[in-house]
Image (cartoon, rainbow, N blue to C red):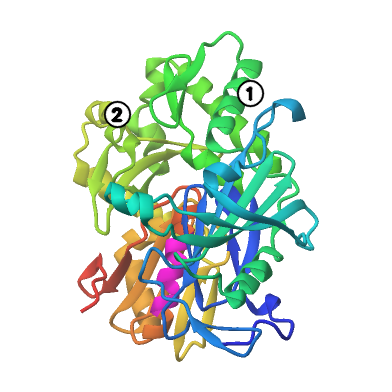
Amino acid sequence: MSDYRSGNFDDAWRLCRGPANWFTFRCPDEIDVRQNQTLIELRWRSEDSASSGNPNGASQSVVTDSPSRVVLSMVTWWDDAETDATRRPSPDLGLLFPQVSALHPEPSLKIKSANEVWSGISRRPRTGCWLSRVFGRRSQYQWRLWTIRSGRLTIVATVQSPDRELLDPGFVLICERVLATLEIAEQPAWPPDVFLKQVIELARQNFPLLQTSVSRGFSLRLGHSEIGLSNFYRMYLQQPEQFRRIVLPGLTTLVRLQELSPEQLVPALHEVRDHIRPMLSAEEDSRNDERVRMPWVGGLSVGYVVDEDDSYRFIQPQMLETWDLSLDELHDLAIANLRQYAEENPLEVTMLGDDAHPRMLMPVRPDAYNCSRILDPGFHGRLRDLFGPELIVGVPNRDFFIAVSMKDAALIDQVRSRVHQDFATMHHPLTKRLLVVSADGVSEYCEG
């Protein structure tokens, strides 16, 4: 294991992001970062790589398999209180570490945000039969607590030793080094519940004659229409300062559609024929029930849109009935229009490797139809001309795909990790599964 006590190693550590992009921190490769909602856990990857330097020269191994072993936990909350007097107080030590028998203040972290650090020892309650509770020896453990505050955000980090053991000084040192890299966003994004309240307020300000209310799931009802907010929220997390620019156009489009007459809602086919295109979407997307769609591969389905330059709307079953089109006829028409769109908008790409031996390819610019190109067999052929008979493609979101050579196993692993990350954070998510493009078409990638 590297000696974390010497050298300027922090910049070489990988960059990690907290919930809602509230903060970033850096972490060594030997430590796994597990995140679930507002909880982050840091633990060693394996026992073999977990020997930490001890200031006294000893080396102690930290086992990750046992839940009782030390792990740094970080919990973040957003306090929406308007005044300091009504804000949530500091964490209660009696709840975090009951029966404290020793308590000591520690030096604060050298970071911009206000913080305090405490160490202590707590006893565990006696368990078992009444004799053991009376005469038994109570176990105790050592712990460390960091509390960091910035505006409405509070981050509480804790680590505790196994029973009847002391905290490993080397592990505590690494925890301190990790926490010292914390950088909190200048304008932290609102959590989902606050974002929803702000969207409702924005809708009421701009459309006061329409009734606005919370709908099922993470959705908003405006007038007699409903709009999902998940994609808006993902876009907002990337640019919190652009809240109005991200949300207001979507609300305006929803209101405009409500004002259309039945003839405008279902235009004549000849008026929109050249503007019908395919659009990939996640199969489990709740809005799929309201669209014409065709199941595809890798947890994806193909929807169809009428492109209106500044926006698009999905084709509904009523439109197909009016146009007297079958689903296959609609698909063929959409693919033909996609090819025309591709000719008028050539794909500019970044490539790793060279023309003779390409390793990876991805679009330079985001585009709503980037991943839809994967539906075109002609596009498959051009990719196979570059990469060979088979290649791997990841489509984490609507605007971005990544193609990689089937022969490069190490790069495929890196691409899988990138796809998982982008699927979890980018707007219009599609799938975290990898796809295979071959002479037979597109299928899901399954490792043998």
Label 2, label 1: how many angstroms apart (C-alpha)? 32 Å
Q: Which residue is mark 1?
A: 202
Identify the residue at image location x=50%, y=25%: 254
Identify the residue at image location x=61%, y=75%: 169
Dot 1: within a 10 Å radius of its alpha carbon, few (fewer than 14), some, or many (20 or more) residues? some
Residue 42 picture location, percent across and down: 51, 65
Identify the residue at image location x=32%, y=59%: 375
Residue 86 shown in magenta: no
Residue 339 in view: no
2 and 1 marks in contact (CB < 8 Å) = no
Depicted 126 relative to depicted 42: above or below: above
The range drawn in magenta is 412-421
Depicted 142 relative to depicted 184: above or below: below
Secondary structure at badge 2 equals helix
Identify the residue at image location x=70%, y=26%: 86
Residue nearest the viewer, comparing 435 with 387: 435
| Amino acid at circle 1 | Leu
Judge depth for marks 2 and 1 and give the one in front: 1
Residue 428 picture location, percent across and down: 45, 47
Residue nearest the viewer, comparing 106 with 183: 106
Dot 2: within a 10 Å radius of its alpha carbon, few (fewer than 14), some, or many (20 or more) residues? some
| Amino acid at circle 2 | Met
Residue nearest the viewer, comparing 33 with 102: 102
Residue 103 picture location, percent across and down: 66, 54
Q: Which residue is mark 2?
A: 319
Quarter in which the C terminus is drawn? bottom left
Magenta stretch: helix, strand or loop mostly = helix
